[in-house]
Amino acid sequence: MSLLGFGSAPIGNLYQPLTDVQASEAVESALTAGIRYFDTAPHYGFGLSETRLGAALARTSASEPVIISTKVGRLLVPSTSRASVRHGFADAPPLEPQFDYSYDGVMRSFAASLQRLQCEHIDILLAHDLGPLTHGADHPARFREFMDGGYRAMSELKAAGQVTAIGLGTNEWQICEAALKHGDFDGFLLAGRYTLLEQGACESFLPLCARRGASVILGGPFNSGILATGVKSAAIASGKVPLHYNYEPAPQAIIDRVAQLETLCEEFAVPLAAVALQFPAAHPQICSVLAGLASATQVQQSMAWINTPIPDELWQRLRECELLHPAAPTPA
């Protein structure tokens, strides 16, 4: 698995429409750059991301095996909505994602993903968006539905050799901890919860994964963009570029923390985005860091950031300023 992974939500028209050609160019550029891990989901563009990824990979021949992860937990049903943007995806197919963590729902979702991805096997299958953050008061019922049905389906798919590894893909490390109490999982995709802005996962969750032999893929290293853009540019000052954190307008406390991070990075002439991308990768339990990529230019920029030399002194300064958790390792 490559250290930098390709997050495929953008090629599902996340926030803005792309053409099939643009999506294909992004995937091909990633392969050329050495990226060998691609994450997608039925939810991303309501099948569009999986379809485009499958088509692009079918047209290329990578020199090394490609690893694909996709997700279950939602079924796509016909939609009558004419809205141009639904659930954050623009100009997507007329389908609506419907939560379903049952045995039958997971099996149906998996079969549909195989067709869209044009493959007969999935490397990593993840249960998508379990947790109170997504389901609120319905979470206990959804979790029971998954453990009684969906988890059994995923385990059977793994035992049959149709899936290599199973886990959860979520924005909450707490639900991953809870899942480990009830089942055996090979790993997790944790989005946005172990970054320069949030490091609580290194207190109990990541050590628990180490004890259980579960790997972690880190998604959302830029916390919805604020760690990629910073808060000081002229475009941001003019209001042309909004500051997002966890898919919402960034609160002032987060803006202030990012400004502090950005100032320290400027002292060492290192891009904040490079530090944000390399920080989570330093944890031994994290096997890949996913960046959402929509173009060849973004692929090239992310590859430059992941390979930017960062002085040890910068990591020391971040720790001295209490911007890093005491238990959080830094790159050597």
Image (tube, rainbow, N blue to C red):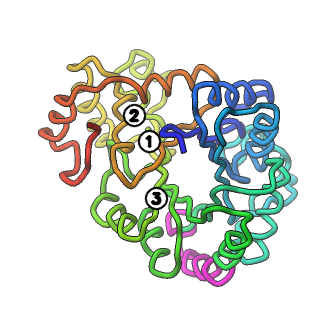
- Asked if the residue at tag 1 contacts the one at tag 2, i.e. Cβ–Cβ closer than 8 Å, the answer is yes
Q: CA distance from mark 2 to mark 1?
A: 8 Å
Q: CA distance from mark 2 to mark 3?
A: 24 Å
On the image, numbered disc 1 is attached to which residue?
221
On the image, numbered disc 2 is attached to which residue?
227
- Residue in the picture at 32% in, 64% down: 207
Q: Give the class, few, some or many, for how many residues have Cα within 10 Å of label 2's Cα (few <14, many ≥20).
A: many
Query: What amino acid does circle 2 point to?
Result: Leu
Q: Which mark is residue 215?
A: 3
Q: SS class of the residue under badge 2?
A: helix
Please determine whether, in this image, residue 149 is positioned above or below residue 120: below
* Rendered image quadrant of residue 32: top right
Region in magenta: 131-149
- Residue in the picture at 31% in, 52% down: 199
Q: SS class of the residue under badge 3?
A: strand
Q: Nearer the viewer, mark 2 or mark 1?
A: 1
Residue 5 vs residue 250: left or right? right
Q: CA distance from mark 3 to mark 1?
A: 17 Å
Residue 173 % position (x, y): 43, 63
Q: Nearer the viewer, residue 26 or 141?
A: 26
Residue 331 is one of the magenta-drawn residues: no
- Asked if the residue at tag 3 contacts the one at tag 2, i.e. Cβ–Cβ closer than 8 Å, the answer is no
> Outermost residue toward the left?
320
Query: What amino acid does circle 1 point to?
Result: Pro
